[in-house]
Amino acid sequence: MGEVVTVLGFGAVGRASVAALVRTSRQVIVCQRTRPVDLPEGVAFRACDVLDAQSVASAVQGSAQVVLAIGFAYRTSVWREAWPRAMANVLDACARARARLVFIDNLYMYGPQREPLREDMPLSGGEGKPAVRAAVTRQWLAAAHSGRVKVTALRAPDFYGPGVRLSHLGDAGFAALAAGRRAWLLAPPDMPHDFAYVPDIARAVCTLLDAPDELYGTAWHVPCAPTRTPREILALGATALGQRLRLSAVPLGLARPLGVASPFMREFSEMAFTFDRPYRVDSGRFSRQFWSDATPFEVGAAATARSFLPAR
């Protein structure tokens, strides 16, 4: 057997990364608070609470590489407390184990922008979730630049994929269409917006795990298919299901007023800048170094829509 790779978190991206890793000769360990019911055969499990330093140290012990694929409740108050603490625990554990770290990240740390997002953009000086992600970025960059931990970040925009429900295009999008219902969006349906295909994110994770040390200490943007609008992407899924797209959307201007009564809408309104303008990601740096053939929406949207059909 090959080296040990520990995956912290078994959500949509963690699950896809594990599936990609089991096709290699590596030993894979999944770590989170509870054992997943769908843990693949041959994959080990260790209970771990990322907010407990000793728990993380025990989980990571003996690993050559670690993939950080965790998430927290979508509340700024939770993020302010949990993310810095979790990152500190993981960095300390990786330093102790001499394990390399791939951090699966989002793009919030850039804050509001009008041009395609690049890895060399300055970190957000704002508040809320962008400020939290900027602070966490400074944590891992400091550890990398000091030589304490070999760490890199893989940054992705909103994602979608087969079986992925917690997504702008998930339960209320592709899953609704597969159930014969109207799709709903909490975003303008005709605004160009990049989406990453979860299997592509998993592929990029494996790419970075195979990358040499000299390519660590920086962030990379995962390649996405050419930019489409949410309406166009969902229409491809509807076509694959043999349907005509039926779609409604909550006007973005209502997010803040609705937030008075809805905690989720209050949190969503904080990130409205990711949907009130074209949202494009420049992945040229990753593409030039590694690969650029992201899954086309014609393939990804069809596979995602069909994944929600009832089993026969």
Image (cartoon, rainbow, N blue to C red):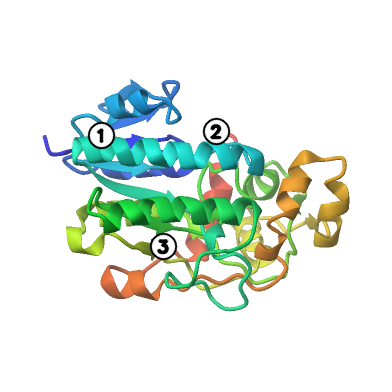
Q: Position of residue 282 (x, y in %)?
A: 46, 74
Q: Nearer the viewer, mark 2 or mark 1?
A: 1
Type of residue at label 2?
A: Ala
Of labels 3 and 2, earlier in sequence is 3
Crowd band around label 1 with a 10 angstrom C-alpha radius: few (<14), some (14–19), many (20+):
many
Q: Position of residue 172 (x, y in %)?
A: 70, 46
Q: Horizontally, is 204 left or right of 149 in the view?
A: right
The foreground one among 267 and 148 is 148
Q: Name the image quarter holding the N terminus.
A: top left
Q: CA distance from mark 1 to mark 3?
A: 22 Å
Rendered image quadrant of residue 42: top left
Q: Residue furthest left?
A: 1
Residue at image x 42%, y 35%? 9
Rendered image quadrant of residue 312: top right
Q: Which mark is residue 222?
A: 3
Q: Position of residue 265 (x, y in %)?
A: 77, 47
Q: Disc 1 designates what residue?
A: 28
Q: CA distance from mark 2 to mark 1?
A: 29 Å
Q: Nearer the viewer, mark 3 or mark 2?
A: 3
Q: Is residue 179 visible?
A: yes
Secondary structure type for disc 1: strand
The foreground one among 234 and 168 is 168
Q: Which mark is residue 6?
A: none
Type of residue at label 3?
A: Val
